[in-house]
Amino acid sequence: MFSMRWGGVVGIAGVAAVVWTAAPATAQENGYTNLQVLPADISRAALGAIMLQNLQGLGLPRRSGEGCLHCHAGSTDTPRNTGDYASDEKPAKARARVMMAMVRDINEEYLTQIDDRIAPTLEVGCYTCHAGRIDPTPLTDLLLQEYEGGGVDAMVRTYRATRARYFAADAYDFRVGT
């Protein structure tokens, strides 16, 4: 039996963790190729849960496979099951692999060393840093970049647009001190 834990998501409603147990399978049985971070014998349900968690952590849409196309080769004009999920064509897929390995290592190697962890055991996940956005840059850094590139007007425009889009989404800290 195979068991693996992947990071949880901390949000307004609390904590949610993805935990699964899957029966072993061969790569030929599940049809997956080019898995480099995830186990070759991962079940379809487990893989789907991880991919859904990735989409949610980065705020990518689920509908018609649009979010999947952030990392995977394919097109929204063709059925989802015809995409080339094994392709390494997109640089975002390589970044995702590095990030998924980092999350796994933090949860399995580092957080396990903390004595008296609270229960349920909190883990990091995509949402921990990304908070529902592709770029995890904090608001203060984002605004500083805009100021340095275009001055006060650019910074104010970016702040207003970002606040209008993300205010109630728990993606940025819009408190006065920020």
Image (cartoon, helix red, strand yellow):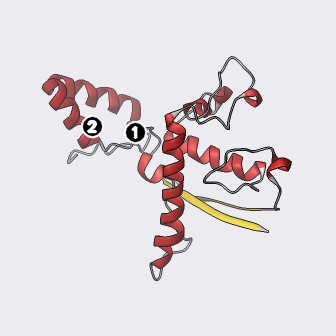
82 over 43 or under it: above or below: above
Residue drawn at (38%, 43%) of the image: 136
| Amino acid type, label 2 | Leu
Please provide percent x and percent y for residue 95. 48, 43
Residue at numbered disc 2:
142
Residue 102: give x, y in percent of width and height. 48, 58
Q: Amino acid at mark 1?
A: Asp
Residue at left 42%, top 39%? Answer: 168
Is residue 77 found left or right of 177 in the rendered image?
A: right
Q: How many marks?
A: 2
Q: Does any portion of residue 15 appear in the rendered image?
A: no
Asked if 23 appears above or below 176 in the picture, the reply is below
Left or right of 169, for residue 147: left
Residue holding disc 1: 135
* Proximity of marks 2 and 1: CB atoms separated by less than 8 Å: yes
Residue 30 versus residue 45: which sits nearer the camera?
A: 30
Q: Residue at x 56, y 71 (%)?
A: 120
Most extreme residue toward the right is 29
**Classed neighbour count for the residue bearing mark 1: other residues with Cα under 10 Å, few (<14), some (14–19), many (≥20):** few
Rendered location of residue 1, percent (x, y): 79, 69
Tell me which corner region of the image, top left, top right, bottom left or bottom right, holds residue 6.
Answer: bottom right
Could you say which is closer to the camera, residue 34 or residue 56? Answer: 34
How far is mark 2 from mark 1, CA to CA?
A: 10 Å
Q: Secondary structure at mark 1?
A: loop
Query: Which residue appears at 63% of the width and 44% of the height?
Result: 52
Outermost residue toward the bottom in this view:
115
Residue 127 visible in the shown view: yes
